[in-house]
Each structure stands twice: as structure tokens, then as C-alpha cells.
Image (spheres, rainbow, N blue to C red):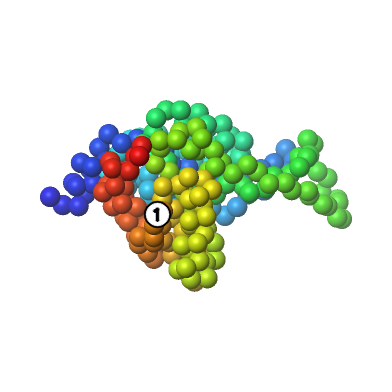
């Protein structure tokens, strides 16, 4: 039996929800605050999990290159509030795994402008306030789901990776964290409640390691 056949047998019948891409928050009816997330990793994971036998739903932000495949259900969002509503709705559908990979806006305007701002302003101050951490709501709505969170930081070393990942595990109830960084090229670590499990030097390698982990552990861990 080759590895792909092993994964397919193990993930067959599993339902996986993935959030991916950037989110927007409104400045005025024409302008938004966004980030540089491309959705590439979310696409790779969605395809890999589907090929491994899972039924996959992708909540996809405003990416430049949308995922196009009839084998994966894709639901679109652009704004933070749209993702919040979609996520709340989907979490009531008894998923086995949630991969919260979207680059969610950490701040929003305290008072968005209801009319387009005039471009003649010589000076403009925008007052920002924190958004609710959507990852902290997932286990409240679906306490039995296996939750994979993402932590993007400029980590100092592997000890810092472990510390930051464990913090997210405690805060959000994650079962697994992908601690990744863009410092010196892409790197990612899989971290569970005990230790760092693996290191990946690319998004493709991370996808393989995550698929392997879920294939070996999801039956035992899901709903535990």
C-alpha cells in the first residue's frame, strides 16, 4: 500500500473546514485595510485533504487566484464580519477538523466612514480598535472539533516557537498549532500540547506533514 492510499483510507468520511486568505475591514465605502495573505497554503491543504479522502469546505477570502475545483466546496468572503458569520454557521455542521488558516484582521476602525473620503486631506488619523479573535470562538461553538490554529511570528528560536504555540493552545483550545515564520524564508513547525512534532521548510512540505499527522491521529484525537 502506498502512502496516498493509506491516507485516503484513514481520512475517508472525515469532514474538514478550512479558512484561508486575507480579510478586509472597511475604511470607507471604497477603501479597506487588508494584508498580504495569498491563500496559497489554504489551497494546498484543501486539495491534499480532498485527495486523502476527506470532504472539504474552504472559506476563501479575497485572494487574487481563487481555488477552482468542483471537488471542494468553496464559500467566499471579503470582510471580517462576513467570515465571522460564515464560520459561526459552518461550525454548526459537525465538522471533524477545523483548520483556521485565514489571516484575520486584528484591528478595525472604531468608526468607519460612511461616505468616500476626500483625497484632498493633508493629514488623516484613523483610530483602530481590536477585533474579536475568531479562533477563540471555535471551540465554544464546536467543542468536539479537532482545531488546528496558526501562529505567524518572527520566532527567536525553537524554544520561542514552543512557547508561542502553547500560548495559542491555551487561549483557543487548539489541538494542534502550525507556528510559521517568513523570517529567512518560509518555515513552519507542528506543535501539539506536549512538544514540537516536525519542521517544514516550505508550504508543500507543511501540507504533507499536516496530512500525515491528521491521517495517523484524527480517529483517536477527534472528539476526545
- Residue 68 is at least partly visible in this image: no
Q: Is residue 110 left or right of residue 80?
A: right
Q: Residue at x 54, y 48 (%)?
A: 171
**Nearer to the camera, 40 or 143:** 143
* Residue 13 in view of the camera: yes
Q: Residue at x 43, y 43 (%)?
A: 147
**Residue at the left extreme of this rendering:** 1
Seen from the viewer's position, the closer of residues 142 and 183 is: 142
| Residue at 87% in and 55% down | 122
Q: Is residue 148 above or below residue 191?
A: above
**On the rendered image, what quadrant is the C terminus found in?**
top left
Is 211 situated left or right of 57 in this image?
Answer: left
Where residue 87 appears, as percent x and y from the top left, is 51, 34
Name the residue beneath numbered marker 1.
192
Residue in the image at 38% along x and 50% along y: 44
Q: Position of residue 176 (x, y in %)?
A: 41, 50
Q: Position of residue 24 (x, y in %)?
A: 62, 44
User: In the displayed structure, does residue 215 sit left or right of residue 2?
Assistant: right
Front-most of 32 and 1? 1
In the drawing, does residue 194 fall left or right of residue 4? Answer: right
10 Å crowding of disc 1: few (<14), some (14-19), many (20+): some
Give coordinates of residue 111: x percent, y percent: 78, 40
Amino acid at each position: 500500500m502506498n502512502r496516498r492510499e493509506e491516507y485516503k483510507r484513514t481520512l475517508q468520511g472525515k469532514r474538514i473546514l478550512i479558512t484561508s486568505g486575507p480579510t478586509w475591514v472597511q475604511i470607507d465605502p471604497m477603501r479597506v485595510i487588508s494584508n498580504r495573505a495569498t491563500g496559497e497554503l489554504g489551497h494546498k491543504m484543501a486539495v491534499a485533504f480532498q485527495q486523502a479522502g476527506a470532504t472539504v469546505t474552504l472559506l476563501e477570502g479575497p485572494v487574487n487566484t481563487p481555488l477552482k475545483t468542483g471537488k471542494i466546496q468553496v464559500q467566499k468572503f471579503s470582510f471580517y464580519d462576513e467570515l465571522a458569520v460564515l464560520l459561526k454557521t459552518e461550525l454548526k455542521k459537525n465538522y471533524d477538523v477545523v483548520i483556521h488558516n485565514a489571516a484575520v484582521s486584528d484591528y478595525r476602525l472604531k468608526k468607519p466612514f460612511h461616505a468616500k473620503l476626500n483625497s484632498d486631506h493633508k493629514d488623516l488619523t484613523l483610530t483602530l480598535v481590536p477585533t474579536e479573535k475568531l479562533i477563540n470562538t471555535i471551540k465554544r461553538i464546536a467543542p468536539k472539533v479537532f482545531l488546528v490554529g496558526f501562529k505567524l511570528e518572527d520566532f527567536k528560536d525553537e524554544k520561542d516557537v514552543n512557547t508561542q504555540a502553547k500560548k495559542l493552545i491555551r487561549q483557543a483550545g487548539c489541538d494542534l498549532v502550525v507556528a510559521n515564520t517568513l523570517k529567512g524564508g518560509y518555515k513552519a513547525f507542528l506543535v501539539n500540547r506536549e512538544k514540537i512534532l516536525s519542521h517544514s521548510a516550505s508550504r508543500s512540505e507543511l501540507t504533507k506533514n499536516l496530512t500525515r499527522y491528521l491521517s495517523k491521529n484524527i480517529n483517536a484525537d477527534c472528539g476526545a
